[in-house]
Amino acid sequence: MAVINDPGVAANISRVGEVATGATGAMHFTPKPIPWSVGHYRVTHRFAILATQAAGSRLFEIRNSGANLIIPTRMIVKILSLSAHTAIIENSLDVYKGLGFTVVDTTNTVTPVALAKRTTGMSAAPGNAQIRGVTVAGAAAGMTGGTITALANPIAQLPYVAAQAAMAAADTQPRFANLLDAFDDVNGTHPFNLEQNEGIVLANRVLLGAAAGASVYVDFSWAEVTAY
């Protein structure tokens, strides 16, 4: 067991490795963000999932276009289904790591505006990241035109059930969004490091029916560093 004293306040003592509880309090600490040499950034995007949404259709993506490393720190994906679907179906929005990502998609795309988390000192957003999202109104084919090889298995999944019944205007039961935190690595686990021409892609899993409708919300944060 080791003892750490606070030189400013004699009563503040932390006993590291102590099993029994006593009069001393727990150790307080402040976790530090990833040291940045370029910057920390955040972007959000909202879009619709449509009828006949294609299996594997790309809906959101971020590509590292430069020699620095991009480290995803958070990706929250939420889906809210409000319209009636043709049939009850199990579906998923899947997050993939992409390799050979030399060209971002060019069709059915918009470019969400990213923000640096600090005004001065950090390079302007989005750094070397290229960000694309499917058009806000949606596109059944998703985004196309890019050059990317997604790994065979997703690194995160957001399953949901496409319901046959739409939520009525007078529905008294709230309908909550399904939620995924794709980068919930904690306790010292190694984060993903995206090298040049690597990236992250959000895709629809299965072909939807002739009637479908949902809204998807993406909150994505990352750090860009010269080394990690």
Image: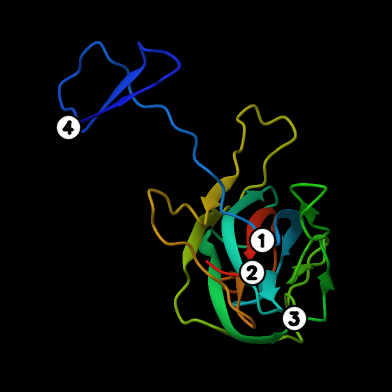
Residue in the image at 75% along x and 77% along y: 143
Residue that label 1 marks: 37
Front of the two marks 3 and 4: 4
Residue that label 4 marks: 1
Instruction: Give the image location of residue 221, x and y in percent.
Output: 65, 55
Does 195 appear above or below 35? below
Q: Nearer the viewer, residue 63 or 106?
A: 63
Front of the two marks 3 and 1: 1
Q: Callout 3: helix, strand or loop?
A: loop
Residue in the image at 74% along x and 48% along y: 117
Query: Is there CB contact under 8 Å for labels 2 and 1?
Result: no
* Image side of residue 74 versus residue 169, left or right: left
Q: Callout 4: helix, strand or loop?
A: loop
Q: Amino acid at mark 1?
A: Ser
> Which circle's residue, 3 or 2, is located before the other in the chain?
3
Does 80 appear above or below 59? above
Residue that label 3 marks: 104
Residue that label 2 marks: 209
> Which circle's residue, 3 or 1, is located before the other in the chain?
1
The span from disc 4 to disc 2 (Cα, nearest Å) is 62 Å
The span from disc 3 to disc 1 (Cα, nearest Å) is 25 Å
Q: Amino acid at mark 2?
A: Gly
Q: Residues within 10 Å of mark 4 (few under 14, many from 20)?
A: few
Instruction: Give the image location of residue 84, x and y in percent.
Output: 67, 53
